Amino acid sequence: GQCATVCPVGAITEKIEIKDVWEAIENDDIHVVVQTAPSIQATIGEEFGMEPGSVVTGKLVSALRHIGFDGVYSTEFTADLTILEEGNEFLRRLEGDKNLPHITSCCPGWVKFAEHNYPELLPHLSTAKSPQQMFSTLAKTYYANEKGLDPAKIYTVAIMPCTAKKFEKERDEMRSSGYKDTDAVLTTRELARMIRELGLRFDLLDDQDYDELMGDVSGAGTIFGTTGGVTEAAIRTVKEELTGEELERLDLDFRGTNEATVEIGDKKINVAIANGLAKASEILKAVKNGEKDYHFIEIMACPHGCVGGGGQPLPVDEQKKDARARGLGSIDETSSIRKSHKNPKIIKLYNEFLGEPLSGEAHHLLHTNYKERPKN
Ligand code: SF4
């Protein structure tokens, strides 16, 4: 067809991955668990003629159940878990004045770029796995235990904003469950294609809730999908852990800015936020030259963060990306839980399975390492 001449590789791999997912769903022996990245609920509506930034969480869940997934969850749950692991890792680094600046690692586009171009900075990257990988690992361990399922018969699917997430799942290290942690990654557009293949009228679907076990999410997990969101989520947790005080005001509003200084107790924390690799290179150059002294740097490869990812609905422009980010922000503002460490299902997960943040089991399942790759 026409697409085969325009984008042969992309089109073929897309078709193969969608086919694999349909096959897993049709196999009664296999339990198929899906997770949706935080941004998808504010972007997929555009595929079905809805306004940019429309929040369609309930319809998204409903569509996934119609498709036939056995467990339907949000990656926001493990975004909260990433904050607990990475926030505590940052605190340790801060207290020991070690490996600072601390640099986020939840964007595989940035991680790969760093492996090729900034190998000397790899010890600064958080070792916490991305929320996608944490979710899949837990699906084949914690979730399998709780549900009494054989992990060999669990198939994990992630709905993600970009194809960098497909590369991430193939990394050798991503097998800490004892199996391939993530089996398939579909972009927002690929999921929309599956929904169309079923002939569903997305705009007419009823609103449904995510499944229970790993189902609670906080607004902090939601804003992972937009630039500045990870930093804001981390500061909410780190500040309370360091000072023991409840944060009174939650809208720290890093979204949109590139630099900020946050006072936590008697410490002043300098943060920098880069969305887009050009901006990241600028910030990293300033760090290497000793011109800047940051403690925490958030890097997302895509301008605007994941709401601007390459697998999101097309065509796209700046206004649409802004509207998507506002959509995510509105979910956070109205969430009853807005801090990752207050998520009751995360508390239960630590109490019953992981112990505490950075425990041996948490290290084994939720942390990873990076390797230098040839310069490109
Ligand atoms: Fe993917 Fe872009 Fe998000 Fe990175 S910022 S995870 S490359 S969509």
Image: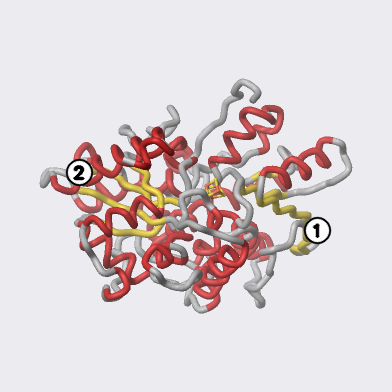
The amino acid type found where label 2 is placed reads Ala
Which quadrant would the C terminus be assigned to in this image? top right
Image coords of residue 107 (percent x, y): 55, 45
Which residue is identified by label 2? 24
Asked whether the viewer can see residue 91, the reply is no
Q: Residue furthest top?
A: 374
- Is 278 on the left-hand or right-hand side of 225? right
- Of residue 261 and residue 1, the one placed in the foreground of this image is 1
Please tell me which residue is depicted at 48% across the width and 60% down the height of the picture.
39
- Circle number at residue 94: none
- Of residue 101 and residue 288, the one placed in the foreground of this image is 288
Crowd class of label 2 (few under 14; some 14 to 19; many from 20; radius 10 Å)? many
Image coords of residue 155 (percent x, y): 25, 43
Counting every numbered tag in the picture gives 2
Quadrant in the picture for residue 140: top left
- Is 208 on the left-hand or right-hand side of 127? left
The amino acid type found where label 1 is placed reads Lys
Please tell me whether mark 2 sits on a helix, a strand or a loop.
helix
Which residue is identified by label 1? 268
Crowd class of label 1 (few under 14; some 14 to 19; many from 20; radius 10 Å)? few
Quadrant in the picture for residue 57: bottom left
Image coords of residue 113 (percent x, y): 62, 34
- Of residue 139 and residue 283, the one placed in the foreground of this image is 283
Q: Residue furthest left?
A: 28
Which quadrant would the N terminus be assigned to in this image? top left
